[in-house]
Amino acid sequence: MLANVKEMTFPQLGDDRGKLIVLEELAKVVPFEIKRVFYIFDTLPGIVRGNHAHYSNRQLLVCVSGACTVACEFPDGRTAEYRLDWPHKGLLLEGMIWHSMKDFSQQAVLLVLASERYDEADYVRNYDEFKRICSEAK
Ligand code: T46
């Protein structure tokens, strides 16, 4: 069962006027065709978002302002947390990974590039269902 997380550091362009980062699809930085872009902002203190996995959708997460933590659980039960706190850091999530986003700072804007259009049927939102899918795939 595909489940891959990759921490990425994007090349920074720019000059003495300021910085610029380019997220281009396929061979350049983003390893999939980008079908959808959304961003999460105005998240209140203490709120945890996400709490789901995807069947097919691949996503690249970038906190373009502020910071947040992405907590992941993999099909084999391993867990890991990633702090996204710079616009040049990204987290690639591919495959069946239970993930949640938490500890949003004030002014945090989490940008998400997605490989698929929105489809609620691609979500596993029930944790027991996630564990069942993972154990059946063993
Ligand atoms: C993910 C994390 C990182 C849409 O109608 N279209 C969309 O493209 C999206 C992303 C959401 N929605 C609707 C579905 C819900 O009624 O917007 C509402 C909030 O979505 P959700 O509760 O899934 O939001 P998060 O912040 O928990 O999760 C989102 C993404 O849904 C998800 O793919 O991995 O960000």
Image (cartoon, helix red, strand yellow):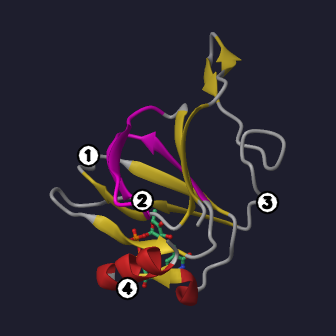
Left or right: 11 in relation to 64: right
Q: Which residue is mark 3?
A: 33
The residues bearing labels 3 and 1 have C-alpha atoms spaced at a distance of 31 Å
Q: Position of residue 5 (x, y in %)?
A: 52, 48
Magenta part of the chain: 59-86
The yes-or-no answer for disc 3 within 8 Å of ligand 1 is no
Q: Are marks 1 and 2 in contact (CB under 8 Å)?
A: no
The amino acid type found where label 3 is placed reads Glu
The yes-or-no answer for disc 4 within 8 Å of ligand 1 is no
The amino acid type found where label 1 is placed reads Gln
Q: Which residue is mark 2?
A: 74
Q: Badge 4 local density, few (<14 within 10 Å), some, or many (20+)?
A: few
Which is nearer the N-term, disc 3 or disc 1? 3
Q: Which mark is residue 106?
A: 1
Which is nearer the N-term, disc 3 or disc 4? 3
Foreground: disc 3 or disc 4? 4
Q: Are marks 3 and 4 in contact (CB under 8 Å)?
A: no
The residues bearing labels 3 and 2 have C-alpha atoms spaced at a distance of 24 Å
The answer to which quarter of the image holds residue 38 is: bottom right
The amino acid type found where label 4 is placed reads Glu
Q: Badge 1 local density, few (<14 within 10 Å), some, or many (20+)?
A: some
